[in-house]
Image (cartoon, rainbow, N blue to C red):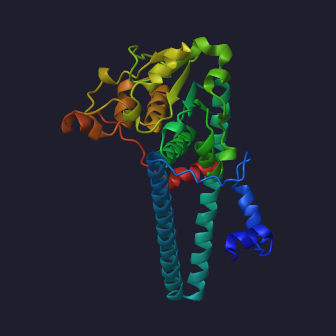
């Protein structure tokens, strides 16, 4: 009596297997044997990270689609209003209205061109004579995708506000690799930014100027009183520092470089931690370069919700800044 296995062994029964199946099997076989390698399951932590990233990407895509749809509706509404307005006018009035609109657009374009050229000139001069400020972006492996996205938005804001400043600094981006580099490269106009870029660590970039490096960290015991033009001030690009308390201070100590903290406590009381976002620190430094007044700089930038002062103090002492939307900031970054 023949069994299935004996027929196969004796060669009387041949099972045809497509070549594609052979290649798949070969890919799954260890180099040292014919046994198939079992798939490696993801750890619980890796599964959580993957799920979190998928949710973030889905939410990001949904938000982007909603914004696009809202813009489309707004554009259609404006076109309809314009057409209705033209239809109610005589031919002569219609021609005059169209020419007037073209003139306004022409003036707006000329103004933007002038602003763009002025900004480029200020930033080019800052690269020669401005205060050196470095954004240390070597912490991307400690952040989740949504935190990296938040940091990239802060960097965009830093560049835009630096370009608008009357006394811009010489801004550097260092140590950006992996996901953060990918997101930065996707930003429209990033390649045209008038800014220093170095994917390597700042400690290598400024290896001959190590004695001039000063890491700005809230954990330092040294209070910053002035901005020294010879110094190179470093800001840690890290979102959600509560998980990594003291990490920038430890990095500076390990590298043997100076540290300092902004003199916030000398001028106002904070309702919470003195840790600020990257763009807030940049804006404070820029305001100080312009005014040489720490108090005015802090009140101009730090949100009232983070301060412990009376409403009277807030109304008398707070310096109001120009409110610019995210869309306006993006436009300024793209136009350079």
Coordinates of residue 98 in the picture (x, y in percent): 60, 76
* The quarter of the displayed image where residue 178 is located: top right
Please indicate whether residue 165 sits to the left or right of residue 33 in the image.
Answer: left
Please indicate whether residue 191 sits to the left or right of residue 314 in the image.
Answer: right
Q: Look at the image and tell me whether residue 228 can be seen.
A: no
Q: Quadrant of the N terminus?
A: bottom right
Please indicate whether residue 36 sits to the left or right of residue 164 in the image.
Answer: right
Q: In this rendered view, identify the residue nearer to me: 285 or 200.
A: 200
Coordinates of residue 197 in the picture (x, y in percent): 66, 35
* The quarter of the displayed image where residue 166 is located: top right
Q: Look at the image and tell me whether residue 59 can be seen.
A: yes
As drawn, which residue projects farthest toward the front? 1
Which residue is depicted at the point 59% across and 48% down?
Answer: 183
* The quarter of the displayed image where residue 261 is located: top left
Q: In this rendered view, identify the residue nearer to me: 83 or 209.
A: 209
Coordinates of residue 260 in the picture (x, y in percent): 44, 18
**Number of marks in the image?**
0
Vertical placement of 207 versus 111: above or below?
Answer: above
Which residue is depicted at the point 52% across and 34% down?
Answer: 139
Which residue is depicted at the point 42% across and 48% down?
Answer: 323
């Amino acid at each position: 009596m023949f069994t299935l296995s004996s027929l196969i062994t004796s060669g009387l029964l041949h099972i045809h297997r497509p070549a594609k199946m052979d290649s798949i099997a070969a890919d799954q076989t260890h180099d040292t044997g014919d046994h198939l390698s079992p798939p490696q399951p993801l750890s619980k932590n890796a599964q959580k990270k993957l799920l979190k990233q998928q949710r973030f990407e889905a939410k990001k895509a949904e938000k982007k689609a909603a914004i696009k749809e809202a813009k489309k509706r707004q554009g259609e509404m404006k076109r309809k209003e314009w057409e209705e307005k033209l239809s109610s006018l005589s031919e002569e009035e219609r021609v005059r209205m169209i020419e007037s609109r073209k003139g306004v657009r022409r003036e707006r374009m000329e103004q933007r061109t002038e602003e763009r050229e002025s900004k480029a000139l200020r930033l080019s001069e800052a690269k020669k004579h401005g205060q050196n400020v470095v954004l240390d972006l070597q912490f991307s492996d400690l952040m989740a995708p949504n935190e990296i996205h938040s940091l990239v938005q802060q960097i965009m804001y830093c560049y835009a506000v630096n370009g608008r400043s009357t006394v811009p600094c010489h801004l550097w981006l260092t140590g950006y690799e992996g996901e953060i580099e990918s997101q930065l490269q996707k930003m429209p106009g990033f390649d045209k930014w008038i800014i220093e870029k170095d994917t390597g660590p700042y400690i290598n970039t400024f290896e001959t100027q190590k004695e001039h490096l000063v890491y700005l960290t809230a954990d330092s015991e040294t209070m910053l009183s002035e901005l020294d033009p010879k110094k190179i001030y470093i800001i840690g690009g890290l979102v959600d520092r509560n998980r990594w308390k003291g990490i920038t201070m430890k990095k500076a100590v390990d590298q043997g470089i100076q540290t300092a903290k902004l003199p916030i406590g000398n001028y106002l009381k904070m309702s919470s931690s003195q840790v600020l976002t990257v763009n807030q620190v940049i804006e404070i430094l820029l305001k100080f370069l312009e005014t040489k007044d720490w108090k005015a700089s802090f009140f101009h930038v730090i949100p009232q919700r983070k301060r412990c002062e009376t409403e009277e103090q807030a109304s008398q002492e707070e310096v109001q800044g120009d409110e610019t939307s995210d869309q306006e900031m993006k436009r300024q970054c793209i136009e350079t």
